[in-house]
Image (cartoon, coloured by chain):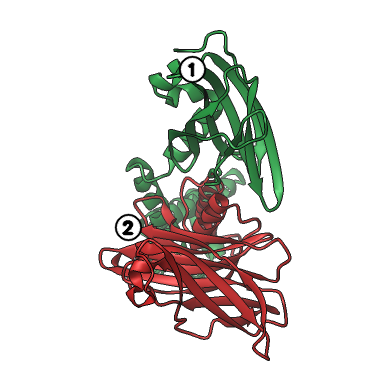
Chain colours: A red, B green
Amino acid sequence: MNKRNKCPDRRRKALRRCALLAAILLFLSVTRLYTPLPGMAIAEAADVCDVENPEVVDWFYDGTLPITRFSLHALVDGERSMMLTAVSFNPLAGGWYYRAFSEAEAWDGSGLYAGVYQHGQDDKAVGYLFGRIDDPEIVTVELTETVQAVLAPESGLHPDDEVTLPVTLKDVPIFERSGTSYLLTEIELREQSYFTRGFQLTGYDKDGNAVATIEPHWRYWHT
Amino acid sequence: MTRQTYTQQVLSCLRRLTEAERSAVQAELEAHMEDHMLALMDLGYEEELAEERMLQHMGDPAEVGRELDRQYSTFWLVVSRAATVCLALLAALALTGTFNTYYLFNSIRARVAPWSDIQQEWEEAVNQQLDIRQPVGSDILRILGSGTKIEEDEAVAVVVYCQYDQSPFGLVSDRNIGWLDCRGEEAIGGGGGHSTSAAAYSRRELVVQAGDPYVTAVWERYGERVELQVPLEWEDAYE
């Protein structure tokens, strides 16, 4: 028998099936009929938030809430805004999908951009401060929260008045990635977060002088 | 040795092949041997001699079998079967309605037949149907109609509109639209809406002054501002 090496059927069959599988997955991904990868869910969240050209800066896992036990969290930077989002996977519900997000605009040249992400389920809740620091003078930040004075009876104010209280950051918030300084840290939430009226973030230089103060956009999700 | 014996000796060396592959190899081997024999018989050989010469030319059956077996890599069998399992899984997911066809359907419906997804009372509140489209960020704002009414001496403008992503496969952003009256002041009012991730429908009722020729939709993002005038018709204002 001629022993010349012709391309075996087995390899051809395998390559044809892989090509068909790849073509179908590409079609499903482009049309978003099925999102087999977490990055696609992030792209969807970015579409909803208007985050242009999103790029994931950092991934992390936080399974505090039952609903996010099988989720991934991602800090995402875009052209003029950024976001923190949680994405989950359900093979019977279209693949990966976004579950929660909070966005922060980052276009006005102020040098300090931030958002607050809060997600609660039953009696549990998690909160994160995230953002970007473009001003090289800023080396530390401080987060405060405006709440109804009912949460601070020692202030002596009427319960409907507002008072500003400090927010504890659980980690060192600033880290560098690809030459850019980002903010990401879990924050300590109050039990009665529905009295929150807003946040303020102040950036300080190495001498402790306040360089910039902003009001981060915040979003609370309740599942 | 006969052709049948030769074939069986070759097949006995094929350890990596599946049943279907073994059958295919057997058929190809037998066809090849028959073609060779017929060619020899055309040259005048007797059948027995042709078979003998053909088998000599084929070579050692064990070596032929081992060479064939080497060409069937286990790796490609595993890849092929894994791809088959994935394809079967995708087919099962398609049959169970797992794919997000709902979003695509709603996106297309907002483009082609938006009024089919709007409740009747909204349609009745409109006294002029419009089709004004304006890109806002990555979305399209589409004004479907406006209406006017006088309620307890208060003039109200009603605007029905929808938003969807510029791409039929995209999701609508959750950016709100603001409203101004024709004097540039914020128009106060209420309304309602419903949405999927693919399209959002809204109805706004804005307090204006009777006779105002238009209200203005305002969209702002990243320092960019888009304004769109929505004409109002007062001749058929509801009372």
Task: Provide the chain ID for the residue under circle 1.
Answer: B
Q: Please rate how many residues cluster around mark 2, counting C-alpha atoms within 10 Å: few if below 14, some from 14 to 19, many from 20.
A: few
Classify residue B142 by image quadrant.
top right
Q: In this orientation, does residue A145 appear? A: yes
Q: Residue furthest bottom?
A: A207
Q: Position of residue A136 (x, y in %)?
A: 72, 81
**Image quadrant in which the C terminus of chain A is located:** bottom left
Q: Secondary structure at mark 1?
A: strand
Q: Residue shown at 49%/49% (left/top)? A: B31
What's the residue at 57%, 8% (across, down)? B235
The chain letter for the residue carrying disc 2 is: A
Q: Residues within 10 Å of mark 1 (few under 14, many from 20)?
A: many
Residue type of the residue flagged with mark 1: Lys
Q: Which residue is mark 2?
A: A223
Amino acid type indicated by mark 2: Thr
The quarter of the image holding the N terminus of chain A is: bottom right
Mark 1 — residue? B149
